[in-house]
Image (spheres, rainbow, N blue to C red):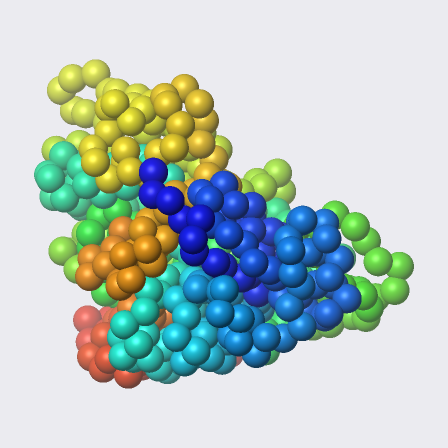
Amino acid sequence: MSNFADIGAAVIGTGFIGTVHVEQLRRIGVDVRGVLGSTPERGAARADALSVPHAYGSLDEILADPAVDVVHVTSPNNLHVPQASAILGAGKHVVCEKPLAMTAAGSAGLVSEARASGLVNAVNFNIRFYPLHQHMRESIAEGALGDVRFVTGHYFQDWLLLDTDWNWRLEPDKGGALRAVGDIGSHWLDLMAFVTGQPIVSVMADLATFVTARQEPTGPVETFSTGRSANTVTRPMGTEDTATLLLRFANGARGSVAVSQISAGRKNSLQWEIDGSDGAAWWDSETPDHLWLGHRERPNELLLRNPALMGDAGKAAAALPGGHVEGFGDTFGALFRAIYRDVAAGAPNPDPPYADFAAGHDEMLVNDAVARSAELGRWVDVDRSSSSGGTATASAESTPMEVRA
């Protein structure tokens, strides 16, 4: 394993995901210099709780610290572009939570800045780094399933089931115009494009908001918090709780995915199935060390995550021997190892296993197509015609439908 002890990192954000970043950076040996909280008081309290040596008072203070080589951005979505841009401008490598930006125009600008800087840049699509996903991408590229034909699945959670559930992601000016798709659906969409090696080229989207008004607490709320505030304000909801998407991939494969943040009992349930001309594969995040492989004329198989039985990419992502389950938190460690190898080398990988800013921008273009399709009620192509950010357009193949309000 590489030695990252000479690399200093700072983390912007001290909530659920920011804490995971801090913990996993430490596990791979990175020197976490400090954190930046939403307020100086919160930053100091969280730095103390996490035993981090310093609570920065501002982003400028981070950028002025010569001991910080890499900055992790885990702040609300509306802050990603200005913060990532400032970090690149200061000559520091950057790891940004998804989505990369609020709009494709914003993410396109970051792609240009990152390329010009020559710095390592990454978007935290950590789900790619379950070892079996790295293994499956390599296997599909080698023809293990034949031609990919059909890709299906879901991503369900229940943390926004009740009208008393609240988080900044519910506010479009902070979280963006897409909520369930932008927050968790984007993980599934990025993952399937990555594993199959096939970009999504067209979408048909149906979005729905079932909890039309929510009770916003007057004080701060942690993501996935179960606490309830006695003092609330009723807020109307303008973003989706659920989504059903039909998909077309670059090679002609078809797909579908259902996304929900209001599915009772589903805490973090991501499933996918890839059906090819020679075989199939299926995976469930609740049993992440198991990969089902389907066959027509011989018995099906169940591959347990085991470095001895996986390809090179799967082995690189695995940190534990077979039979020792690696879960959600471990994917961050695997992702960060891949990123920090490039940081240690001093330059971006031209073909990284992680999502760089270009991949993060591509997912923004897919999200734009989802939003446009839901608005028009028809198939919409993903517009990759301009490196500065595309505008989704209705597919010429589609049958026009009445535009929904």
Can see residue 156?
Answer: no
163 and 119: which one is in front?
A: 119
Identified at 21% across, 16% down, the residue is: 299
Tell me: 57 left or right of 310: right
Give the tally of numbered discs.
0
Quadrant (top left/top right/bottom left/bottom right) for the N terminus: top left
Tell me: 65 left or right of 402: right
Q: In which quarter of the image is residue 61?
A: bottom right
Identified at 67% across, 72% down, the residue is: 57
Tell me: 326 left or right of 309: right
Q: Position of residue 229 (x, y in %)?
A: 84, 58
Q: In the image, is residue 115 above or below residue 182?
A: below
Identity of the residue furthest to the top in this view: 299
78 and 363: which one is in front?
A: 78
Q: Where is residue 140 in the image (x, y as percent from the top left)?
A: 17, 41
Q: Where is residue 296 in the image (x, y as percent from the top left)?
A: 16, 24
Identified at 40% across, 49% down, the residue is: 4
Q: Where is residue 15 in the image (x, y as percent from the top left)?
A: 64, 57
Q: Quadrant of residue 79?
A: bottom right
245 and 54: which one is in front?
A: 54
Q: In the image, is residue 231 above or below residue 30?
A: below
Can see residue 299?
Answer: yes
Identified at 19% across, 41% down, the residue is: 138
179 and 142: which one is in front?
A: 142
Q: In the image, is residue 115 above or below residue 260?
A: below
